[in-house]
Image (cartoon, rainbow, N blue to C red):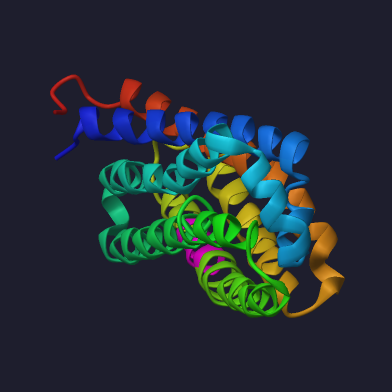
């Protein structure tokens, strides 16, 4: 049984998430040297974070919750791909892992890192050295391993499974399924940037391709509902 409202909501979630990603990413790139700042040390990054004030903190908080839009998007994709229930169940799990891993990874900025920045501003030399270690450790664990590696591998898996499932659905054009598979493979390669710098160019390219593919996927889901039988619900 089709679920038009959920499919449409999923498509809209992908589009809104893509637009929000572009806007927030652009703001942080212009005002926080993002994503290059992720490789900076506490002495450079924490004072800059604190200087951004409440606006910077709010922007990071919004950015952290954007990945949660993957959840309604994944549910909409599941509802649309009726012929691949087992595969799409795995896709739902992958999207859930991706959403929460990325969310938790990004939330370190308006929460733990913000507290570190406040402490760093009036700390002595020895305390700053300790804070630098905490800052680096959190970036490695919550950023590199959880948010980037696990989150992006899981997200690529969702796109790959969804792309394969779309190929089995007569209401989706074949190009949409193949495009999803191609992007998923690129995203998998880009997720390895913390393992080898050889794929950094692919990772940088994916920052452009990710919102583009999310918009295309969202449009594909919305257009899909227009081709359903009139008695679909």
Q: Which residues make up the magenta segment?
A: 151-160
Count every numbered label the image shows and give the total: 0
Q: Is residue 21 visible?
A: no
Residue 44 placement, left or right of 146: right
Residue 231 placement, left or right of 91: left
Q: Is residue 46 visible?
A: yes
Q: Provide residue 160's location: percent of width, then percent of height.
A: 52, 60
| Main secondary structure type of the part rendered in magenta | helix
Q: Is residue 11 magenta?
A: no
For image coordinates 81% across by 64% down, the residue present is 200
Q: Provide residue 78's location: percent of width, then percent of height.
A: 30, 49
For image coordinates 47% across by 48% down, the residue present is 64
Q: Provide residue 161's location: percent of width, then percent of height.
A: 45, 61
Check the image and report above or below for 88 versus 53.
below
Residue 166 placement, left or right of 118: left
The N terminus lies in quadrant: top left
Check the image and report above or below for 50 versus 136.
above
């Amino acid at each position: 049984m089709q679920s038009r409202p959920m499919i449409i909501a999923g498509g809209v979630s992908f589009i809104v998430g893509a637009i929000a990603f572009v806007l927030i990413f652009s703001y942080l790139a212009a005002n926080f040297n993002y994503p290059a700042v992720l490789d900076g040390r506490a002495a450079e990054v924490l004072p800059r974070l604190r200087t951004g004030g409440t606006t910077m903190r709010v922007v990071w908080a919004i950015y952290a919750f954007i990945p949660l839009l993957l959840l309604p998007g994944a549910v909409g994709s599941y509802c649309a791909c009726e012929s691949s229930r087992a595969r799409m169940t795995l896709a739902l799990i992958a999207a859930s892992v991706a959403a929460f891993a990325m969310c938790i990874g990004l939330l370190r900025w308006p929460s733990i890192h913000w507290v570190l920045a406040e402490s760093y501003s009036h700390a002595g030399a020895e305390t700053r050295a300790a804070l630098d270690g905490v800052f680096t450790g959190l970036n490695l664990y919550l950023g590199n391993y959880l948010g980037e590696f696990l989150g992006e591998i899981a997200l690529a898996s969702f796109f790959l499974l969804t792309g394969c499932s779309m190929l089995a659905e007569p209401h989706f054009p074949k190009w949409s399924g193949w495009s999803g598979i191609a992007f998923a493979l690129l995203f998998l390669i880009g997720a390895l940037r913390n393992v080898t710098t050889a794929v950094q160019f692919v990772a940088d390219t994916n920052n452009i391709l990710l919102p583009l593919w999310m918009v295309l996927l969202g449009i594909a889901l919305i257009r899909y509902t227009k081709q359903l039988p009139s008695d679909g619900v």
